[in-house]
Image (cartoon, rainbow, N blue to C red):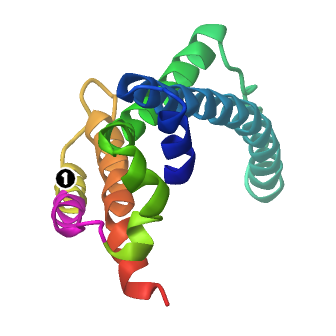
């Protein structure tokens, strides 16, 4: 995408415009992904509930499983969270795209292929998040809500995401 940003910059789009364009693209993709996740998650939840209910009923005791339902407020919250996480994830790439000169963006190519991505801080942050996630699993729920479990799950996802550039560098040919 660096080349496209360079072309846009050469056509007169300023740094703020590039920054906004990258964030807008992330918001649209985040909202689309969250919307698709809501639909597929509801469908798969209903299918899984039916299958598990039948299995438990056949093997152990008849079970009347509840319906899977998603309130509109919950769907909007999930949509907002998906969009917000996509925007948050796009802040650093958007800032990098906005800082890049026209010449550099058109001629430089992919920073990862050229070896320009520094992975040290990302690796340290990823390992730290994974360690913190492991520690958070030791805490009990608060008023029946497994808050530390939720934060731990986020730490696992974010930790492995931060380790991705290192793994690409190590395993790329």
Q: Is residue 75 left or right of residue 5?
A: right
Image location of residue 48, percent across then percent down: 75, 46
Q: Is residue 161 above or below residue 9?
A: below
Residue in view at x 67 percent, y 19 percent:
70
Q: Is residue 20 left or right of residue 156?
A: right
Residue in view at x 50 percent, y 37 percent:
10
Image location of residue 96, percent across then percent down: 32, 44
Is disc 1 surrounded by few (<14), some (14 to 19) or many (20+) residues within 10 Å?
few
State which quadrant residue 11 falls in: top right
Task: Give the number of callouts.
Answer: 1
Q: Is residue 120 left or right of residue 158?
A: left
Q: Is residue 125 magenta?
A: yes
Image location of residue 57, percent across then percent down: 80, 48
Q: Is residue 133 left or right of residue 10?
A: left
Q: Is residue 124 above or below residue 30?
A: below
**What residue is shown with label 1?**
138
- Relative to the observer, which residue lies in front, 62 or 94? 94
Residue in view at x 34 percent, y 29 percent:
145
Q: Is residue 130 magenta?
A: no
Identify the element where label 1 is drawn.
loop
Does the rendering let one see residue 79?
yes
- Relative to the observer, which residue lies in front, 142 or 30? 30
- Relative to the observer, which residue lies in front, 47 or 156? 156
Instruction: Give the farthest residue toward the bottom.
Output: 173
Residue in view at x 48 percent, y 54 percent:
106
Q: Main secondary structure of the magenta part?
A: helix
State which quadrant residue 60 falls in: bottom right
- Relative to the observer, which residue lies in front, 133 or 112? 112
Residues drawn in magenta:
116-128
């Amino acid at each position: 995408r660096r080349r496209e940003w360079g072309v846009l910059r050469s056509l007169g789009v300023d740094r703020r415009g590039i920054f906004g364009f990258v964030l807008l693209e992330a918001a649209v993709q985040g909202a689309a992904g969250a919307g698709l996740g809501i639909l597929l998650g509801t469908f798969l939840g209903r299918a899984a509930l039916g299958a598990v209910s039948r299995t438990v009923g056949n093997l152990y005791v008849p079970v009347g499983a509840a319906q899977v339902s998603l309130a509109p407020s919950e769907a909007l919250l999930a949509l907002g969270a998906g969009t917000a996480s996509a925007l948050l994830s796009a802040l650093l790439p958007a800032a990098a795209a906005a800082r890049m000169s026209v010449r550099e963006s058109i001629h430089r190519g992919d920073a990862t292929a050229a070896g320009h991505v520094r992975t040290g801080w990302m690796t340290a942050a990823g390992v730290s998040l994974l360690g913190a996630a492991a520690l958070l699993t030791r805490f009990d729920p608060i008023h029946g809500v497994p808050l530390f479990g939720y934060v731990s799950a986020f730490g696992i996802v974010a930790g492995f995401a931060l380790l991705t550039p290192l793994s690409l560098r190590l395993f790329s040919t």
